[in-house]
Image: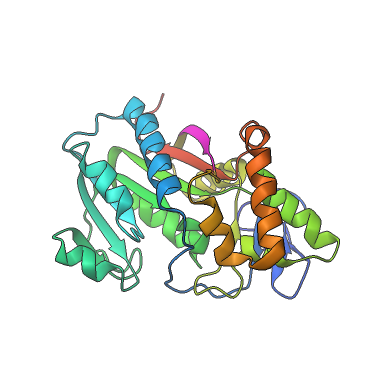
Amino acid sequence: MDCFVCENVMAQKSAWYYVCPKCGFEKTTLESGAGRGVDGLELLRRQNFALMIDHLQKHKALKDISCLEVGCAEGWFIEAMQSQGVNMYAIEPSEMALPLQEKGYNITQGFFPDALKGDEQYDMIVFNDVFEHIPAPIGAIEQCEAHLKEGGLLVINLPSNKGLFYRLSKLLHKFGYSGPFERMWQVGLPSPHVSYFSPQTLTRFTQKYTDLRPIESFTLPSVAKDGLKERISASYNGLFGKILYWGIFCAMPLIKILPQDICVVVFEKGKSA
Ligand SMILES: [Zn+2]
């Protein structure tokens, strides 16, 4: 298997897991479908969307712009953006699209980019925890460029393989305890991760296949005290879950200053600096 980012041959590490020895991009052969995430994340996600909007406002006045969200899940990002006056459109492959359509949101059920009607263009295209599930990321990134207006922004929010929790899970996996590592890749869940980027590999990948320019990269927290108990118990029952909860709870001040597990990279179409 060749690396999408640097075309080097990827090293196979397990039945389903490959790493590029040259650039650090990671990939699996797991099949990703339409599925929902884990319980206990609503508050964290909503807080992170508010932080994202603070960053996006530095680059673009949000009022009255058009924004396409690819994979809107429960619609929390749509709500946050609409409160800023953004005209939101979304694509969602799962059944979660239906109640949102009933609420009157502009949501098409299907996969990106096939679900788009034609050559419509947006001021902003956003992926929240979606890009790492896409089986053909090269076609997807090219279509993002095609569906952005001049001066438009592409915003990709995804897990980073430079993050503390991912690195810890990888270390445990090396010592034969693979539970957390498989959880990071969402093995056995309806929609496993297909790829694991970092801000660096995502930027290199995007610049390889498009003319989009990176204009900002930032990280977001992947754990919050609120909802933590529920989120951990969704994956780990019993004593291990309790230990994990108290471990993370007590380490929270330290976790805040170590590399975060969620990164956001913002790209711009056209308009050279
Ligand atoms: Zn590579």
In the foreground, 229 or 33: 229
Quarter in which the N terminus is drawn: bottom right
From the viewer's perspective, is 184 left or right of 86? right
Locate residue 100, reporting x and y percent.
22, 63
Quarter in which the C terminus is drawn: top left
The way the protein has been coloured in the rendering is rainbow
Q: Which residues are magenta?
A: 215-221
Q: Residue at x 36, y 60 (%)?
A: 71
Identify the image quadrant of residue 90: bottom left
Q: Is residue 193 visible?
A: no
From the viewer's perspective, is 174 left or right of 106? right
Residue 200 drawn in magenta: no
From the viewer's perspective, is 229 left or right of 145? right
Q: Residue at x 16, y 37 (%)?
A: 64
Say if 38 sits above or below 224 in the image.
below
Q: Residue at x 35, y 39 (%)?
A: 153
Locate residue 121, reporting x and y percent.
24, 50
Q: Is residue 207 visible?
A: yes
Residue 216 drawn in magenta: yes
Locate residue 79, reporting x and y percent.
25, 48
Locate residue 51, reporting x and y percent.
41, 34
The total number of labels drawn is 0
Say if 44 sits above or below 256 in the image.
below
Q: Main secondary structure of the magenta part?
A: strand
In the foreground, 42 or 84: 42
Identify the image quadrant of residue 105: bottom left
